[in-house]
Amino acid sequence: MKNIISLLLICFSANVLLAQLDRSKMPEAGPAPEIEFGEYKVYELDNGLKVIVVEDHKLPRIAMSLTIDRDPIYEADKAGYVSLAGEMLRQGTSNRPKDQLDEEIDFIGASLSTGSSSVFTSGLSKYNEKLMEIMADVVLNPAFPVEEFEKLKKQQISALQTAKDNPDQIANNVFYSVLYGPDHPYGEVMTTKKVESIQLEDCKQFYQNYWIPNQSYLTIVGDIKPKAAKKLAKKYFGQWKEGNIPRNSFEKPAVPENLKLSFANKDNAVQSVLSLGNTIELKPGDPDIVKLALANQILGVGSMGRLFLNIREDKGYTYGAYSDYEYDKLIGSFTASSSVRNEVTDSAIAEFLYEFNRIRTEPVSNEELEGAKNFIIGAYGRSLESPSTVASFALNIQRYNLPEDYYENYLKRLQALTATDVMEAAKKYIKPGSMHITVVGKASEVADKLEKLGPIQYYDDEGNKTEKPSIPVPEGVTAQMVINNYIAAQGGKEKLESIKDIRMKMDGEIAGTPMKLSTEMVRKRPNKYKMEVTASGMGVVQKQVFDGTKGSQSAMGQSQTLEGEDLEDMKAEATFNKEMKYSEMGYQLTLDRMAMVEGKKAYVLEVTSPSGNTFTEYYDAESGFKLKEEQTIETPQGEMINATSYADYTDEDGYKYAKSIMINSGPQVIKMTVTEVKLNSGVKDAEFAN
Amino acid sequence: MKKLLLASLLSGLVIQSYGQTQIEFEEYTLDNGLHVILHEDHSTPIVAVTVLYHVGSKNEKPGRTGFAHFFEHLMFEGSKNIERGEFMKIVQSNGGELNANTTHDRTFYYEVLPSNQLELGLWLESERMLHATVDIEGVETQREVVKEEKRLRIDNQPYMSFMQNMFSKAYKVHPYKNIPIGSMEDLNAAEIGDFADFYNTFYVPNNATLSIAGDIDPDRAKELIEKYFGSIPKGTKDIPQPDVNEPPLGGEVVDTVYDNIQLPAIFIGYRMPPQGTKDAYALDMLTTLLSDGQSSRMYKSLVDDEQLALFVQAFPFALEQGGLFVTLGIANMGVDLASFRTGIDKQVARVRDELITEREYQKVLNKLENDFIASNSGVAGIAENLANYHVYFSDANLINTEIEKYREVTREDLQQAARKYLVNNNRVLLYYLPQNQ
């Protein structure tokens, strides 16, 4: 009989082998296995402590954790005392000095750690009772020894000092501070000064107020019977006295109306640390969570996320780019981050914003949708291998009052989601129009390109507002010297004074549009000026004229005579070699810093006209040429910077002029190239008639 | 096991000892030499599909260091039937995770998949074994990736050059003098023929162990294994393993390394006997005694009491043909390195000079028992452990019994091992100092 069976088996397997194996086809999956979420028991002790037990006898181990489900705390000028209090719990009890505590834990091969709202211990299940007894001793009878407190405080301060230069740490400080506000528990920053002012009493107070059984959960996972676990919990935690639950409430963080750019300068950075994000209203148990999880998966999780594929794989700006979200009882967040090379900082931000907008406005492909679902379901399945996952699910169900079948339904709801659901969740929770973007990097190389996105607020590494970082001016250099250098660079005083008139033609284009512009500019000594802009197929679109006393300007057929301040400004603008005449015309010049402009070190001149207008002018420290002029103007949308940049200085008969001119006016960029320059061609006064 | 359980319940002595420690498995070898190990466990609907190739940096030819680790990268490029770059995507979009790692002695690949995707895992691994894409384009791509990895994990990580510095001084002849990341110059110099030769020599079924753990039907798994791996031809080349007689170190080697670090550090490496020997187990136990836990000797004396160090650790870098017993410490700000070294040496001298106490001995065994059990807490770990034990010791069942090897080591054995190996003329001592000093 046995022989026949094995013979049959051989025949059977031979058949399998004979079946042609087509390697070019990826095997089909079998029927999807049922993911079971495991069972747990919940008990409540008389003092309100909830005990959750997950029974799992696969290995002779046990893990226990205590969670204090407390409200967030704003620590103000002592930020750090809450986490320090958590560490203090591990420093010995009134029954066991620290050395003895260490020895007893190590002797049974176990581990025990404490935090501001939790204690965790694990070991072999033959020591179940011992572990529970030690854990309860730590929770109920902490000794708060003063010498250990001083030691921990010192360690915390030196850790902060070591992290001071760490760009990721600075990014965290600044980003969360602007995202939530510095007066919010999620936005406050720990500093050495704040840690120094912490007293042992602060830690004790926190422990006494918040570590109470009636807002706590004890989860017990592993090789133990639920009833035995309950019995042990009662024996060791039954004496824990309940207390009044402290409640803290906080204002919702303000949501910016536009993109908000924050910058922390780090002079030696070769990479910019980018953080982008917005707060979201998404509480535990919200049916939208699964939708945002899927949208975020497609957008920014791992090496299959769009951010990774675009910013790393396609553009090569970085080693990784990811996004994340968090739901929270108080306030949640959507965030994204990457570290990118200095020179691509602005481009990388543009790609982030592009991907945020794309997932909000276009349905994802079916391939992306199914791949992301499988990824999430697979990760769920793998996580359930650890019984502590079951315990954390049980804990969430309890503390957030979720339905018992929340996690089972989660995967069912995930399976049912469509591309439209993903788009809607993205639209609701990812808000590129009103996001915070923080950059930690080298301001002198990175910042001026970012200014195109909007005004930048600078911060120090602890998240305090600061001025734009500046480079000091070398001793002895004055504003007049900078002007003199510029005149010399252009050909010298004598050469400039020999020029009576200039006629200049330029070709231009408006970035992002097909429009071609041609411009003619005519100047005649001492202050006659004309500029005409012609657009292809539209004729003259803009004209400015000044004849020495009267001026006018017209745009798209609308003409306007210049008066008052506008006329004064035009007069100044029309002045031949106006920089030579600044003092004569009553301009105030201030030189108190230097800055980098397109990688060049430049003197920064604040120029104030008699009428009170202020310009900022940048002069190349090396060549002397003017690199840029900026003016900040008020618009109904807020402040805007108009900038004109000069480059490619070219020689025409001993006179040096900028061949490339770029005008940034808010979001608009106009690039112009000089095509023709005529000097002293005998320009007639009639050209400047109004 | 069931009987045992019943007995203990009846006797009513212990109520806690339900835990099952026995890991059941079966193993067999295909005609082409591929060794197969199967562990069935239905508690979670996932399966770990792993392949261990018995090739590491010690199998590299001179002038071709870094090859084994480089192959770990190259083996994700694709195969005849898997397009370039698709390997990882296939696994992830089918709900799995994957990775690989390389040591001095072996290279290990794994996928953890939903259990209905067992066949997918077998297809992927068989494609890799049968006809992986080894071409110039993949080599060029992965060269850059490996350089980036070296920059990220070694060059830019404070202290991480210690491995190369330590092994290159501890071994003069044996290929253990190189570490898996190898030299970028060697990788640049290599030609496509070198890569093809390496693949044909080492990536063959008779040099591999297929270890599968999780929610499987073993009969069905065997059919599928035969289907995908049965027809892969056996390798035709010799699989060389180093046969080198490394002379004794013959005196303490001391050197100073200037690194981009804030705090000075000390690294000490004592040459070890091969893993699996009684002395190697003894040295492993001594590292636990010295630095595992806050009550351990080095932690207690150097970090807690004297506050000479921010961090101390002793660990066994145990390898197939030797290895290093490493002790290291990062000094606190302003600590004099000579007194720090004296502090470390004092602790090492103590294990040579005195028997450890009964209580400490028991503590070490308890810690090792805990670690031993914890190491089998997931299917991926179980599959890897089974493969390692088979390849290194031809005894996969050590997954259940290795703890006995430690228990056989007596307190006297510990002292003997310390006296034999933890001596100055058997060690390399490296001082790490900040670059700007």
Image (cartoon, coloured by chain):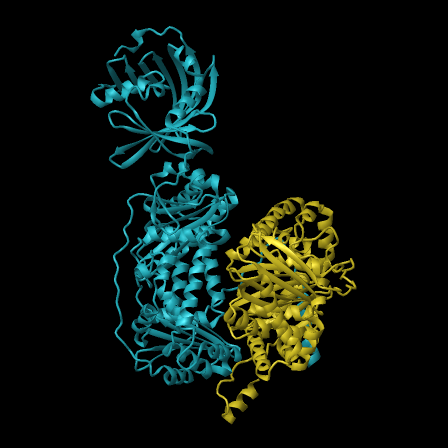
Chain colours: A cyan, B yellow
Residue B57 seen in the current view: no
Q: Which one is nearer the viewer's eye here, B18 or A571?
A: A571
Q: Tell me if residue A71 comes above or below residue A647 in the rendering.
A: below
Give left or right: position of B7 versus A177: right
Q: In which quadrant of the rendered image does the C terminus of chain A lie?
A: top left
Residue A283 location in percent, x, y? 31, 61
Pinpoint residue A126: horizontal percent, then vertical percent: 51, 83
Residue B68 place in picture, x, y as percent: 68, 56
State the residue at coordinates (44%, 14%). Answer: A676
Report the number of numbered marks: 0
Name, please, the residue furthest toward the bottom. B11
Q: Is residue A102 visible?
A: yes
Q: Residue furthest left?
A: A564
- In this orientation, which residue lies closer to the viewer: B294 or A178? B294
Quarter-of-image position of residue B99: bottom right
Quadrant of the snapshot with the N terminus of chain A: bottom right
The quarter of the displayed image where residue B320 is located: bottom right
In-front residue for pair B302/A141: B302
- The answer to whether residue A246 is left or right of residue B156 is left
